[in-house]
Image (cartoon, rainbow, N blue to C red):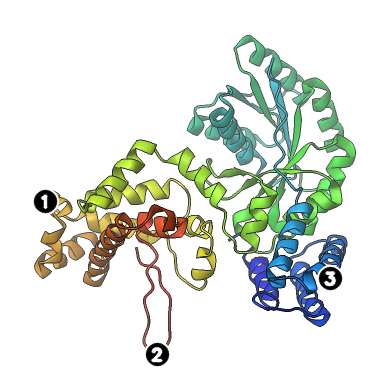
């Protein structure tokens, strides 16, 4: 997952000072040495590492910190603020032409995920800004790129404007703009040709397309997993095109984080979006403050709330909570609940957004396949068994039949029964709690039926049950 290595190392470094009633200059020096190594290992640009550690050290060495109350917590706050600062301080919105057609140019090297990202962006802006997008295929050098964009357009029900590979991209761009104006489209997203490396011909072509489209945004798609190379690519593109923003792809697979932490500081190009998976709805606005909180293991409640709001129906949520509180929750409701959670992304990713949950999950196995297995088990129950949970719980023969029908083990069926019982019990307790004492973690635990810790023999092994 994104930033895992950096997150682990930074949190370990900060544990040296958190919880201490008093800090010495030596404590700060040791912590900063580890922070510096953490950033360098994460492939963060050395200039960024140097300025970051200098700023943190100067503030942490201040008399107010060394002699103040809770100095360790104040140091963590300083690190959080500096992380936020080097990533851009706040989210940068797209510039949109509210009175006419908004043109966005997608540029980048081949293999960075530019064509898929063009589709993701079209879907995002259609949903969040109520725009009518038109995807434009300008990569005449790879017929496969045109076909890929058309496939994405079909999946999203978004039209694709293409004139094959015989016309020049500049000519196609001009005709696409005319077509958009004549047919009521107020957003053009142009997928330009990528290259394996930057060359003069490529840049000249992009400059010509820019003159035709007069785009409000020129967005550079960068592969986050290339680390500092992404920063070098950004610098080269920026010199010629004046890039307005970057989209980091494959951030879900980048355990280091070097590109995200170096890009803004070195190139002054704001990161506007990040790709967090292969699915076409897995594009998120880049919020520096939220990302800094994720890196330091503080969770990301605001993004979690956004995901819930975007993906879950409020009436369904309320109906589910009422059923759970009343004790009438059954396997039909359980499967509906799992499908609601799946809409928000990977279970592991969702859980990490809950403050403190990332740390609790360390070393735990949160496998989305488990949700598929649960669906298979519940699908093997009769209608009566799904509705009346006691039928399965009180009959070993029924459990054996369900296990056989789903291709899972009897122990897995037993764990599902236990998970449902625990969820009912937890919701009963929450129903009798003072609302002011309930927190997001307890609510999310109840909603997901996860996690529950299971102790192994000899060692305390953590597993997350469904």
Q: Residues within 10 Å of mark 2 (few under 14, many from 20)?
A: few
Query: Could you tell me residue 390's position as x and y percent?
Result: 13, 60
Q: Determine the image quadrant of residue 218.
A: top right
Q: Nearer the viewer, mark 3 or mark 2?
A: 3
The answer to whether residue 95 shows anywhere in this view is yes
The answer to whether residue 254 shows anywhere in this view is no
**Tag 3 secondary structure:** helix
Residue at the image position 65 percent from the left and 68 percent from the top: 5
Q: Which residue position holds label 2?
A: 458
Q: Residues within 10 Å of mark 3 (few under 14, many from 20)?
A: few
**Tag 2 secondary structure:** loop
Q: Which residue position holds label 1?
A: 384
Which badge, 2 or 1, comes first in the chain's sequence?
Answer: 1
Label annotation for residue 63? 3
Query: Could you tell me residue 262's position as x and y percent?
Result: 79, 56
Disc 3 and disc 1 in contact, CB within 8 angstroms: no
Q: Quadrant of the N terminus?
A: bottom right
Label annotation for residue 220? none
Q: Relative to 372, is 160 above or below?
A: above
Q: Relative to 452, is 195 above or below?
A: above
Q: Relative to 216, is 327 above or below?
A: below
Query: Who is closer to the viewer here, 38 or 161?
Result: 38
Count of numbered marks: 3
Q: Quadrant of the C terminus?
A: bottom left
Residue at the image position 81 percent from the left and 47 percent from the top: 234
Query: Who is closer to the viewer here, 444 or 401?
Result: 444
Residue at the image position 54 percent from the left and 69 percent from the top: 359
| CA distance for labels 3 and 1 | 69 Å
| CA distance for labels 2 and 1 | 41 Å
Q: In the shown orientation, is residue 119 left or right of residue 259?
A: left
């Amino acid at each position: 997952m994104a930033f895992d290595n950096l997150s682990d190392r930074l949190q370990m470094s900060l544990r040296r000072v958190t919880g201490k009633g008093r800090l010495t200059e030596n404590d700060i020096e040791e912590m900063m040495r580890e922070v510096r190594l953490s950033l360098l290992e994460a492939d963060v640009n050395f200039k960024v590492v140097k300025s970051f550690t200098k700023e943190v050290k100067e503030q942490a060495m201040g008399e107010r910190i060394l002699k103040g109350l809770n100095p360790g917590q104040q140091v963590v706050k300083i690190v959080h603020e500096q992380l936020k600062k080097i990533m851009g301080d706040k989210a940068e919105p797209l510039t949109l032409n509210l009175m006419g057609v908004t043109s966005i140019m997608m540029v980048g090297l081949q293999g960075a995920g530019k064509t898929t990202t063009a589709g993701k962006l079209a879907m995002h802006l259609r949903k969040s800004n109520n725009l009518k997008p038109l995807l434009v295929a300008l990569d005449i050098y790879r017929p496969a790129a045109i076909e890929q964009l058309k496939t994405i357009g079909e999946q999203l029900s978004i039209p694709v404007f293409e004139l094959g590979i015989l016309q020049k991209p500049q000519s196609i761009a001009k005709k696409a703009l005319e077509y958009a104006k004549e047919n009521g489209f107020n957003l053009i997203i142009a997928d330009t040709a990528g290259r394996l490396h930057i060359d003069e011909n490529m840049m000249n072509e992009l400059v010509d397309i820019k003159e035709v489209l007069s785009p409000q945004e020129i967005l550079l798609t960068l592969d986050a997993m290339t680390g500092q190379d992404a920063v070098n690519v950004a610098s080269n593109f920026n010199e010629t095109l004046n890039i307005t923003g970057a989209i980091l792809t494959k951030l879900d697979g980048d355990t280091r984080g070097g590109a995200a932490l170096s890009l803004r500081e070195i190139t002054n190009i704001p990161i506007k979006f990040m790709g967090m998976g292969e699915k076409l709805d897995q594009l998120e606005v880049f919020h520096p403050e939220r990302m800094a909180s994720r890196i330091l293991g503080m969770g990301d409640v605001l993004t979690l709330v956004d995901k819930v709001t975007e993906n879950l129906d409020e009436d369904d949520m309320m109906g589910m909570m009422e059923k759970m509180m009343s004790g009438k929750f059954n396997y039909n409701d359980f499967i509906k609940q799992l499908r609601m959670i799946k809409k928000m992304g990977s279970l592991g990713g969702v859980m990490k957004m809950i403050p403190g949950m990332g740390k609790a999950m360390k070393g735990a196995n949160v496998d989305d396949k488990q949700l598929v297995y649960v669906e298979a088990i519940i699908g093997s129950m009769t209608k009566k068994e799904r509705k009346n949970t006691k039928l399965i719980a009180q009959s070993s023969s029924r459990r054996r039949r369900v296990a056989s029908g789903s291709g899972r083990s009897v122990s897995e069926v037993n764990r599902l029964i236990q998970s449902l019982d625990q969820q009912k019990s937890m919701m009963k307790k929450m129903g009798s709690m003072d609302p002011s004492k309930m927190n997001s973690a307890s609510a999310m635990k109840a909603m997901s039926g996860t996690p529950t810790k299971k102790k192994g023999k000899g060692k305390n092994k953590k597993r997350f049950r469904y």
